[in-house]
Image: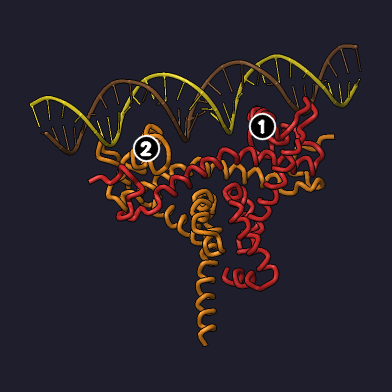
Chain colours: A orange, B red, C brown, D yellow
Amino acid sequence: MSQHENVGHDVETGLIDADAQVESFRQTRNNRRTELVEDYVELIADLLEDGGEARQVDIAQRLGVAQPTVAKMLKRLISEGYIQQRRYRGIFLTDPGRQLAELCRERHQIVESFLCSIGVSPETARIDAEGMEHHASPETLEAFKRFLASTTSSRIVAQARSVS
Amino acid sequence: MSQHENVGHDVETGLIDADAQVESFRQTRNNRRTELVEDYVELIADLLEDGGEARQVDIAQRLGVAQPTVAKMLKRLISEGYIQQRRYRGIFLTDPGRQLAELCRERHQIVESFLCSIGVSPETARIDAEGMEHHASPETLEAFKRFLASTTSSRIVAQARSVS
DNA sequence: GAAATAATATAGCCAATGCTATTTTTCAAT
DNA sequence: ATTGAAAAATAGCATTGGCTATATTATTTC
Protein backbone atom coordinates (compact mmCIF):
# COMPACT_ATOMS: atom_id res chain seq x y z
CA MET A 1 0.00 0.00 0.00
CA SER A 2 3.00 2.25 0.07
CA GLN A 3 4.17 3.88 -3.09
CA HIS A 4 6.92 5.74 -1.30
CA GLU A 5 9.90 3.69 -2.31
CA ASN A 6 10.26 5.80 -5.42
CA VAL A 7 8.89 9.30 -5.42
CA GLY A 8 9.60 9.77 -9.07
CA HIS A 9 6.72 7.41 -9.72
CA ASP A 10 4.18 9.32 -7.70
CA VAL A 11 2.67 10.77 -10.82
CA GLU A 12 -0.75 9.28 -10.10
CA THR A 13 -0.95 10.83 -6.66
CA GLY A 14 -0.84 14.45 -7.74
CA LEU A 15 2.49 15.05 -5.99
CA ILE A 16 3.95 15.92 -9.33
CA ASP A 17 7.09 17.75 -8.35
CA ALA A 18 8.29 16.03 -5.20
CA ASP A 19 11.89 15.81 -6.35
CA ALA A 20 11.84 19.42 -7.36
CA GLN A 21 10.45 20.42 -4.00
CA VAL A 22 13.32 18.68 -2.25
CA GLU A 23 15.66 20.84 -4.27
CA SER A 24 13.77 23.99 -3.30
CA PHE A 25 14.13 23.16 0.36
CA ARG A 26 17.79 22.30 -0.07
CA GLN A 27 18.41 25.55 -1.83
CA THR A 28 16.59 27.51 0.83
CA ARG A 29 18.61 25.84 3.58
CA ASN A 30 21.78 26.71 1.69
CA ASN A 31 20.70 30.30 1.32
CA ARG A 32 20.11 30.54 5.04
CA ARG A 33 23.72 29.60 5.66
CA THR A 34 25.05 32.47 3.59
CA GLU A 35 22.52 35.08 4.66
CA LEU A 36 24.38 36.18 7.73
CA VAL A 37 27.68 36.49 5.91
CA GLU A 38 26.01 38.69 3.36
CA ASP A 39 24.32 40.82 5.99
CA TYR A 40 27.61 41.39 7.74
CA VAL A 41 29.58 42.23 4.64
CA GLU A 42 26.90 44.56 3.39
CA LEU A 43 26.66 46.32 6.74
CA ILE A 44 30.42 46.65 7.05
CA ALA A 45 30.56 48.24 3.63
CA ASP A 46 27.85 50.67 4.67
CA LEU A 47 29.62 51.60 7.87
CA LEU A 48 32.95 52.06 6.15
CA GLU A 49 31.40 54.24 3.53
CA ASP A 50 29.25 56.32 5.83
CA GLY A 51 31.44 56.66 8.86
CA GLY A 52 34.91 55.71 7.72
CA GLU A 53 35.19 52.89 10.21
CA ALA A 54 33.48 49.65 11.13
CA ARG A 55 34.03 48.51 14.66
CA GLN A 56 32.55 45.53 16.42
CA VAL A 57 30.44 47.74 18.66
CA ASP A 58 28.99 49.54 15.67
CA ILE A 59 28.15 46.32 13.91
CA ALA A 60 26.67 44.81 17.04
CA GLN A 61 24.58 47.87 17.66
CA ARG A 62 23.32 47.95 14.08
CA LEU A 63 22.44 44.30 13.95
CA GLY A 64 20.93 44.35 17.39
CA VAL A 65 23.16 41.58 18.75
CA ALA A 66 25.85 41.45 21.43
CA GLN A 67 29.46 42.27 20.71
CA PRO A 68 30.82 38.75 21.32
CA THR A 69 28.35 37.46 18.75
CA VAL A 70 29.88 39.83 16.26
CA ALA A 71 33.40 38.84 17.27
CA LYS A 72 32.62 35.24 16.55
CA MET A 73 31.10 35.97 13.16
CA LEU A 74 34.02 38.18 12.18
CA LYS A 75 36.33 35.22 12.69
CA ARG A 76 34.24 33.37 10.17
CA LEU A 77 34.37 36.26 7.74
CA ILE A 78 38.14 36.39 8.12
CA SER A 79 38.50 32.67 7.56
CA GLU A 80 36.33 32.97 4.48
CA GLY A 81 38.49 35.78 3.20
CA TYR A 82 35.97 38.60 3.13
CA ILE A 83 37.50 40.91 5.70
CA GLN A 84 40.73 41.81 7.37
CA GLN A 85 40.98 42.87 10.94
CA ARG A 86 43.64 44.95 12.56
CA ARG A 87 43.26 44.56 16.30
CA TYR A 88 41.68 47.65 17.78
CA ARG A 89 41.68 49.32 14.38
CA GLY A 90 38.45 48.08 12.95
CA ILE A 91 37.40 45.98 10.04
CA PHE A 92 38.39 46.26 6.40
CA LEU A 93 36.97 44.51 3.38
CA THR A 94 39.17 42.44 1.13
CA ASP A 95 38.65 42.50 -2.62
CA PRO A 96 36.27 39.54 -2.52
CA GLY A 97 34.55 41.24 0.41
CA ARG A 98 34.05 44.45 -1.51
CA GLN A 99 32.79 42.45 -4.45
CA LEU A 100 30.26 40.58 -2.34
CA ALA A 101 29.18 43.78 -0.62
CA GLU A 102 28.58 45.45 -3.95
CA LEU A 103 26.52 42.54 -5.16
CA CYS A 104 24.44 42.48 -1.98
CA ARG A 105 23.88 46.17 -1.97
CA GLU A 106 22.71 46.17 -5.54
CA ARG A 107 20.41 43.25 -4.92
CA HIS A 108 19.04 44.83 -1.76
CA GLN A 109 18.42 48.06 -3.59
CA ILE A 110 16.58 46.33 -6.39
CA VAL A 111 14.32 44.37 -4.06
CA GLU A 112 13.51 47.36 -1.90
CA SER A 113 12.82 49.64 -4.84
CA PHE A 114 10.74 46.98 -6.45
CA LEU A 115 8.55 46.54 -3.41
CA CYS A 116 8.04 50.27 -3.22
CA SER A 117 7.18 50.39 -6.88
CA ILE A 118 4.26 48.03 -6.43
CA GLY A 119 2.86 50.11 -3.62
CA VAL A 120 4.48 48.74 -0.47
CA SER A 121 5.28 51.44 2.08
CA PRO A 122 8.96 52.34 2.48
CA GLU A 123 9.13 51.00 6.04
CA THR A 124 7.63 47.64 5.15
CA ALA A 125 9.69 47.50 1.98
CA ARG A 126 12.84 47.91 4.03
CA ILE A 127 11.88 45.17 6.47
CA ASP A 128 10.68 42.70 3.86
CA ALA A 129 13.60 43.39 1.55
CA GLU A 130 15.98 42.59 4.38
CA GLY A 131 14.53 39.09 4.56
CA MET A 132 13.71 38.52 0.92
CA GLU A 133 16.89 39.72 -0.76
CA HIS A 134 18.81 36.57 0.05
CA HIS A 135 16.23 34.44 -1.68
CA ALA A 136 15.94 36.38 -4.89
CA SER A 137 17.73 34.49 -7.64
CA PRO A 138 19.43 36.30 -10.52
CA GLU A 139 16.45 35.48 -12.68
CA THR A 140 14.01 37.04 -10.24
CA LEU A 141 16.22 40.07 -9.86
CA GLU A 142 16.22 40.48 -13.62
CA ALA A 143 12.42 40.38 -13.57
CA PHE A 144 12.38 43.02 -10.83
CA LYS A 145 14.71 45.21 -12.83
CA ARG A 146 12.61 44.81 -15.95
CA PHE A 147 9.56 45.77 -14.00
CA LEU A 148 11.23 48.80 -12.48
CA ALA A 149 12.36 49.93 -15.89
CA SER A 150 8.93 49.43 -17.37
CA THR A 151 7.09 51.31 -14.65
CA THR A 152 9.54 54.15 -14.82
CA SER A 153 9.02 54.48 -18.54
CA SER A 154 5.27 54.04 -18.32
CA ARG A 155 5.14 56.74 -15.69
CA ILE A 156 7.01 58.98 -18.05
CA VAL A 157 4.59 58.02 -20.77
CA ALA A 158 1.66 58.71 -18.48
CA GLN A 159 3.14 62.07 -17.55
CA ALA A 160 3.71 62.91 -21.16
CA ARG A 161 0.18 61.94 -22.01
CA SER A 162 -1.33 63.93 -19.19
CA VAL A 163 0.60 66.97 -20.31
CA SER A 164 -0.42 66.76 -23.94
CA MET B 1 35.42 61.94 16.88
CA SER B 2 32.97 59.23 17.69
CA GLN B 3 29.31 59.96 17.33
CA HIS B 4 28.27 56.43 18.28
CA GLU B 5 27.01 57.01 21.78
CA ASN B 6 23.61 57.89 20.40
CA VAL B 7 22.61 56.59 17.03
CA GLY B 8 19.43 58.60 16.97
CA HIS B 9 21.62 61.65 16.53
CA ASP B 10 23.49 60.35 13.54
CA VAL B 11 21.46 62.50 11.21
CA GLU B 12 24.47 64.34 9.87
CA THR B 13 26.30 61.15 8.91
CA GLY B 14 23.79 59.84 6.40
CA LEU B 15 22.98 56.81 8.57
CA ILE B 16 19.45 58.04 8.80
CA ASP B 17 17.60 54.92 9.79
CA ALA B 18 19.96 53.01 12.05
CA ASP B 19 17.30 52.26 14.66
CA ALA B 20 14.92 51.14 11.99
CA GLN B 21 17.55 48.86 10.50
CA VAL B 22 18.02 47.16 13.85
CA GLU B 23 14.34 46.38 13.81
CA SER B 24 14.58 44.95 10.31
CA PHE B 25 17.32 42.60 11.37
CA ARG B 26 15.43 41.62 14.50
CA GLN B 27 12.33 40.91 12.48
CA THR B 28 14.28 38.85 9.98
CA ARG B 29 15.85 36.78 12.75
CA ASN B 30 12.41 36.21 14.20
CA ASN B 31 11.06 35.13 10.85
CA ARG B 32 13.86 32.64 10.49
CA ARG B 33 12.78 30.97 13.70
CA THR B 34 9.25 30.34 12.47
CA GLU B 35 10.15 29.42 8.92
CA LEU B 36 10.76 25.78 9.64
CA VAL B 37 7.55 25.39 11.59
CA GLU B 38 5.65 26.87 8.70
CA ASP B 39 7.40 24.68 6.17
CA TYR B 40 6.55 21.59 8.14
CA VAL B 41 2.93 22.46 8.73
CA GLU B 42 2.44 23.41 5.12
CA LEU B 43 4.07 20.22 3.91
CA ILE B 44 2.06 18.06 6.29
CA ALA B 45 -1.14 19.64 5.03
CA ASP B 46 -0.06 18.90 1.47
CA LEU B 47 0.75 15.30 2.25
CA LEU B 48 -2.49 14.74 4.12
CA GLU B 49 -4.47 16.22 1.30
CA ASP B 50 -2.66 14.49 -1.52
CA GLY B 51 -1.95 11.10 -0.05
CA GLY B 52 -4.18 10.81 2.96
CA GLU B 53 -1.31 10.36 5.37
CA ALA B 54 1.79 12.16 6.54
CA ARG B 55 4.45 9.98 8.01
CA GLN B 56 7.91 10.91 9.21
CA VAL B 57 9.54 9.14 6.32
CA ASP B 58 7.42 11.04 3.82
CA ILE B 59 8.19 14.36 5.42
CA ALA B 60 11.89 13.56 5.66
CA GLN B 61 12.02 12.51 2.08
CA ARG B 62 10.22 15.62 0.89
CA LEU B 63 12.33 18.01 2.88
CA GLY B 64 15.51 16.19 2.00
CA VAL B 65 16.52 15.60 5.62
CA ALA B 66 16.97 12.51 7.77
CA GLN B 67 14.11 10.94 9.67
CA PRO B 68 15.45 11.70 13.16
CA THR B 69 15.64 15.35 12.19
CA VAL B 70 11.95 15.21 11.40
CA ALA B 71 11.20 13.36 14.63
CA LYS B 72 12.83 16.12 16.60
CA MET B 73 10.96 18.85 14.81
CA LEU B 74 7.65 17.06 15.19
CA LYS B 75 8.12 17.16 18.94
CA ARG B 76 8.39 20.88 18.66
CA LEU B 77 5.27 21.07 16.52
CA ILE B 78 3.41 18.96 19.06
CA SER B 79 4.56 21.12 21.95
CA GLU B 80 3.46 24.20 20.04
CA GLY B 81 0.08 22.63 19.44
CA TYR B 82 0.10 22.43 15.66
CA ILE B 83 -0.04 18.68 15.22
CA GLN B 84 -1.07 15.50 16.91
CA GLN B 85 0.76 12.28 16.51
CA ARG B 86 -0.58 8.80 16.96
CA ARG B 87 2.38 6.46 17.15
CA TYR B 88 2.74 4.54 13.93
CA ARG B 89 -0.40 6.18 12.57
CA GLY B 90 1.06 9.33 11.15
CA ILE B 91 0.62 13.01 11.80
CA PHE B 92 -2.59 15.01 12.05
CA LEU B 93 -3.06 18.73 12.14
CA THR B 94 -4.86 20.38 15.02
CA ASP B 95 -7.20 23.28 14.39
CA PRO B 96 -4.42 25.85 14.86
CA GLY B 97 -2.26 23.68 12.63
CA ARG B 98 -4.84 23.63 9.87
CA GLN B 99 -5.26 27.37 10.24
CA LEU B 100 -1.52 28.00 9.96
CA ALA B 101 -1.24 25.63 7.02
CA GLU B 102 -4.02 27.42 5.21
CA LEU B 103 -2.36 30.75 5.77
CA CYS B 104 1.02 29.48 4.58
CA ARG B 105 -0.40 27.82 1.54
CA GLU B 106 -2.24 30.94 0.52
CA ARG B 107 0.82 33.08 1.05
CA HIS B 108 3.01 30.65 -0.84
CA GLN B 109 0.56 30.58 -3.69
CA ILE B 110 0.43 34.34 -3.90
CA VAL B 111 4.19 34.73 -3.92
CA GLU B 112 4.73 32.02 -6.50
CA SER B 113 1.98 33.28 -8.79
CA PHE B 114 3.23 36.78 -8.42
CA LEU B 115 6.76 35.85 -9.45
CA CYS B 116 5.40 34.03 -12.47
CA SER B 117 3.26 37.00 -13.34
CA ILE B 118 6.29 39.28 -13.66
CA GLY B 119 8.01 36.83 -15.96
CA VAL B 120 9.99 34.53 -13.68
CA SER B 121 10.04 30.95 -14.91
CA PRO B 122 7.90 28.47 -12.96
CA GLU B 123 10.93 26.53 -11.68
CA THR B 124 12.70 29.59 -10.38
CA ALA B 125 9.44 30.96 -9.03
CA ARG B 126 8.96 27.80 -7.01
CA ILE B 127 12.46 27.91 -5.56
CA ASP B 128 12.47 31.62 -4.79
CA ALA B 129 8.95 31.55 -3.39
CA GLU B 130 10.01 28.83 -1.00
CA GLY B 131 12.55 31.17 0.51
CA MET B 132 10.73 34.46 0.12
CA GLU B 133 7.28 33.56 1.37
CA HIS B 134 8.27 33.70 5.01
CA HIS B 135 9.47 37.25 4.65
CA ALA B 136 6.47 38.68 2.86
CA SER B 137 4.49 40.78 5.31
CA PRO B 138 0.70 41.11 5.02
CA GLU B 139 1.21 44.49 3.41
CA THR B 140 3.50 43.10 0.74
CA LEU B 141 1.13 40.21 0.14
CA GLU B 142 -1.66 42.71 -0.39
CA ALA B 143 0.47 44.50 -2.94
CA PHE B 144 1.17 41.20 -4.69
CA LYS B 145 -2.54 40.41 -4.76
CA ARG B 146 -3.38 43.82 -6.09
CA PHE B 147 -0.83 43.36 -8.81
CA LEU B 148 -2.10 39.91 -9.70
CA ALA B 149 -5.64 41.20 -9.89
CA SER B 150 -4.64 44.09 -12.09
CA THR B 151 -2.58 42.02 -14.48
CA THR B 152 -5.16 39.30 -15.00
CA SER B 153 -7.50 41.94 -16.33
CA SER B 154 -4.99 43.84 -18.40
CA ARG B 155 -1.98 43.41 -20.60
CA ILE B 156 0.93 44.36 -18.41
CA VAL B 157 1.85 40.70 -18.41
CA ALA B 158 2.35 40.82 -22.13
CA GLN B 159 4.61 43.83 -21.65
CA ALA B 160 6.75 42.08 -19.08
CA ARG B 161 7.00 38.92 -21.13
CA SER B 162 7.81 40.68 -24.37
CA VAL B 163 10.95 42.12 -22.83
CA SER B 164 12.31 38.66 -21.98
C1' DG C 1 1.62 -16.77 15.93
C1' DA C 2 6.43 -16.00 14.51
C1' DA C 3 9.48 -13.81 11.44
C1' DA C 4 10.46 -10.20 8.40
C1' DT C 5 9.84 -5.56 7.23
C1' DA C 6 8.70 -0.89 7.95
C1' DA C 7 8.15 3.07 10.90
C1' DT C 8 9.39 5.46 14.76
C1' DA C 9 12.26 6.51 18.89
C1' DT C 10 16.48 7.32 21.11
C1' DA C 11 21.34 8.25 21.93
C1' DG C 12 25.01 10.87 21.00
C1' DC C 13 27.56 13.69 17.95
C1' DC C 14 28.53 18.33 15.41
C1' DA C 15 28.20 23.21 13.80
C1' DA C 16 26.04 27.59 13.91
C1' DT C 17 24.28 31.49 16.29
C1' DG C 18 22.90 33.63 20.08
C1' DC C 19 23.82 35.10 25.15
C1' DT C 20 26.35 36.93 29.86
C1' DA C 21 30.23 37.69 32.48
C1' DT C 22 34.91 38.65 32.60
C1' DT C 23 39.57 39.75 31.12
C1' DT C 24 42.78 41.92 28.19
C1' DT C 25 44.29 45.51 25.33
C1' DT C 26 44.40 50.05 23.40
C1' DC C 27 43.56 54.94 23.44
C1' DA C 28 42.97 59.38 25.48
C1' DA C 29 43.25 62.69 29.04
C1' DT C 30 45.19 64.52 32.88
C1' DA D 1 53.54 58.39 32.73
C1' DT D 2 49.51 56.85 34.78
C1' DT D 3 44.98 56.03 34.82
C1' DG D 4 40.25 55.48 33.31
C1' DA D 5 37.24 54.48 29.65
C1' DA D 6 36.31 52.11 25.53
C1' DA D 7 36.98 48.23 22.45
C1' DA D 8 37.96 43.67 21.67
C1' DA D 9 38.91 38.96 23.18
C1' DT D 10 37.81 35.01 25.74
C1' DA D 11 35.34 31.63 28.52
C1' DG D 12 31.43 29.17 29.11
C1' DC D 13 26.63 28.22 28.30
C1' DA D 14 21.99 27.41 25.69
C1' DT D 15 19.30 26.40 21.72
C1' DT D 16 18.42 24.95 17.13
C1' DG D 17 18.78 21.99 13.39
C1' DG D 18 21.48 18.89 11.16
C1' DC D 19 23.70 13.97 11.10
C1' DT D 20 24.64 8.47 11.95
C1' DA D 21 23.95 4.42 14.31
C1' DT D 22 21.08 1.72 16.85
C1' DA D 23 17.11 0.31 19.42
C1' DT D 24 12.14 -0.41 19.72
C1' DT D 25 7.59 -1.05 18.25
C1' DA D 26 3.79 -2.03 14.66
C1' DT D 27 2.31 -4.20 10.68
C1' DT D 28 2.42 -7.78 7.27
C1' DT D 29 3.17 -12.01 5.61
C1' DC D 30 3.84 -16.62 5.70
Give the number of marks. Answer: 2
Residue A129 point in image, percent of width and height:
51, 53
The label nearer to you, 1 versus 2, is 1
* Residue situated in front as seen by the camera: B22 or B28: B22
At mark 2, the secondary structure is helix
Task: Please state the chain letter of the residue tagged with numbered disc 2 in the rendered image.
Answer: A
* Residue situated in front as seen by the camera: B106 or D19: B106
Q: Work out whether residue A13 can be spotted.
A: yes
Q: Residue at (76%, 46%) from the top-left corner?
A: A15
Residue B118 numbered mark, or none: none
* Amino acid at circle 1: Glu
Q: Work out whether residue A95 can be spotted.
A: no
Q: Residues within 10 Å of mark 2 (few under 14, many from 20)?
A: many
* Amino acid at circle 2: Leu
Residue B41 placement, left or right of B11: right
Residue B80 numbered mark, or none: 1
Residue A18 placement, left or right of A51: right
- Classify residue A8 by image quadrant: top right
Residue C17 point in image, percent of width and height:
47, 35
At mark 1, the secondary structure is loop
Q: Residue at (66%, 32%) from the top-left corner?
A: B80
Q: Residue at (27%, 50%) from the top-left corner?
A: A52
* Residue situated in front as seen by the camera: B77 or B130: B77
- Residue with the mark numbered 2: A74
* Residue situated in front as seen by the camera: B73 or D3: D3
Task: Please state the chain letter of the residue tagged with numbered disc 1 in the rendered image.
Answer: B
Residue B161 placement, left or right of A53: right
Residue B137 point in image, percent of width and height:
58, 51
- In the picture, the quarter occupied by the N terminus of chain A is top right
The Cα atoms of the two marked residues, 1 and 2, are separated by 35 Å
- Classify residue B155 by image quadrant: bottom right
